[in-house]
Amino acid sequence: MPLETPVRIVTELARRGYNAEQEAVTLLSGADVPEHAVDAVVDHADDDALRITAADVRAALAESEGGRERSANGTAAGSAAEAASSGTAPRTDPDEHPSVSTGDRPEATAETGDETGSRSGSEAGAETTDSTTAGAVEEAGHGSATEAADRTVDPSLRSLEVAGDVTGRSTGTGEYGDFVKVFRDRYEKLSKQLRGRVNHRPAEAIGSMSGGSDAAIVGLVDDIRSTKNGHWIVELEDTTGTFPCLVMKDREFAGLVDELLLDECVAIEGTLSDDGEIVFVDSMYFPDIPRTHTPNTADRHVQAALVSDLHVGSREFEADAWDRFASWLHTEEAARVEYLLIAGDMVEGVGVYPGQDEELDIVDIYDQYEAFAERLKDVPGDMEVVMIPGNHDAVRLAEPQPGFDETLRDIMSAHDARITGNPSLVTVEGVNVLMYHGVSLDEVIAELPEGKASYEEPHKAMYQLLKKRHVAPQFGGKTRLAPEKKDYLVMEEVPDVFHTGHVHKIGWGKYHNVLAVNSGCWQAQTDFQKSVNIDPDVGHAPIVDLDTLDMTVRKFA
Ligand code: D5M
Ligand code: FE
Ligand code: ZN
């Protein structure tokens, strides 16, 4: 681990789950052997700490250089966590929830994609690739790009609240017991959604039932294996034990086994074998979104732009496309776009993948955030901005990811943006928008057959997450999960809009009336992406009408 630069220190700390104060990084870089200093400070850090402070470093170094002083670490870390949590206090008085409609709806400016759609970024203005839909991508501007917007908005009509944010509440110690807790909480929350649908018994009780009885189980998927005859054995686990369930390959629902991910919660109903050792499955249920879900809508015509993956600091950051988007936001056509939601990967980060150094335009992580902040300043000052981190950002990688630390908040202070964790449920004028960066989408796409999830149709991978009511079901693969006392990644509430990014492809559609939008990116194809055949959709901005949940995609690349 060559730790010559502060950048590497920040990266190393982020890998281990910590943010760091700039002064802490400076102190660490000045240590005799920075690697050892990082080890010492991490060993020394309080279990609850989210951010390494200069005080932590001093205490750790003093101790490792002879153990002369008692550390002040516990207190320092505690106050860092408090500071982080106070930064997320809602700014809007919940009583100010708007009840007034402005009534002056402008004419529609583009075709909407209110069913489903996905397209490649190279065919400007073309119909969507999904023939069942009316979605389209509009070139932005249409002659009005130079007009100034009539942003005579009344801020008192606005409302923005955040729930399900881990920032400042992380309790994980990384110990085995915490993994047990988080899975217990997952089971409790998701089994509650399934309980009404089957008359289930604990795995342990089923083990002592007589052969041939009807049996139902609600459990987390512990194992999926095929038999030599091509049938499936799905092992389900609840708080009392595990039980094997056999899905015959010729049953009409056998295809559902393809959709199963390890650790997700499902219910099955069936009949016990004569020897009572296995359940023959007759039906399978997912927690799912009720088909009857009626989405909440705003009381007035107001819009939100859903973006992600700017990757500022990368040589491939498409500054021109972003500039066109930011300029368009100042036009009359965009006067109703009052919210900007950014679902992670603000910056390219450092040390995210091998050989990334070669592709960096800005090598210092703080400089990258400074440059991002400049881009943010180009957005109209009267827009409300919400930001969550992604896997390239300087926060811990494991999910749920806390929102940016104080240093980064200061750097990105333009717009007084609402900075929250990944994931977060953001309620915008009554509309519940679940923002999640989307790392688990890679896993869903890798595990499921192409028709059910692919990079070309990322919204279908999102449908799977909605069906499982969990943003990152599978534990232990690509998606890193942090052990916490509760599972922040469960979708307890049904979202009205589900907003992700990460896979750099645009795709949207409705699943049981929930609008799922994956928002593309602002970074041209990197060498790495070329090597793995990822053809990104660059410079698209999905614009959602919050009063109808119709959607238009505008293209700026
Ligand atoms: O991810 C952009 C897309 O590229 C996303 O689908 C993951 C994929 N990607 C990025 N890095 C890797 C590595 N190292 N292996 C496999 N796939 C990768 P982003 O988060 O913007 O880098
Ligand atoms: Fe990204
Ligand atoms: Zn990403």
Image: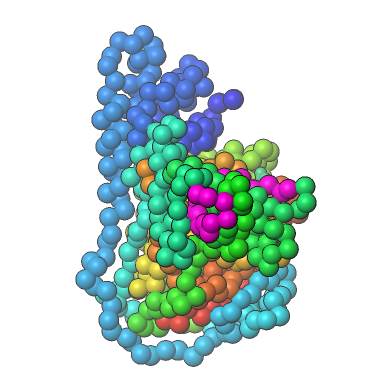
Residue 496, percent from left and from top: 44, 71
Q: Nearer the viewer, residue 115 or 85?
A: 115
Q: Residue at x 31, y 33 (%)?
A: 77
Depicted 95 relative to depicted 332: above or below: above
The quadrant holding residue 94 is bottom left
Q: Is residue 179 left or right of residue 3?
A: left
Q: Is residue 217 left or right of residue 105?
A: right
Residue 174, percent from left and from top: 44, 33
Pick the quarter of the image with the C terminus. bottom right
The quadrant holding residue 257 is bottom right
Q: Is residue 308 left or right of residue 80?
A: right
Depicted 114 relative to depicted 483: above or below: below
Residue 175, percent from left and from top: 43, 31
Q: Residue at x 39, y 11 (%)?
A: 65
Q: Residue at x 55, y 46 (%)?
A: 243
Q: Nearer the viewer, residue 355 or 191?
A: 191
**Span colored in magenta:** 209-227
Q: Nearer the viewer, residue 18 or 434?
A: 434
Q: Is residue 118 visible?
A: yes
Depicted 335 relative to depicted 253: above or below: below
Q: Main secondary structure of the magenta part?
A: strand
Pick the quarter of the image with the N terminus. top right
Residue 270, percent from left and from top: 57, 60
Q: Is residue 386 visible?
A: no
Q: Is residue 408 left or right of residue 355?
A: left
Q: Residue at x 33, y 79 (%)?
A: 153
Q: Is 244 a magenta residue?
A: no
Q: Nearer the viewer, residue 207 or 25?
A: 207
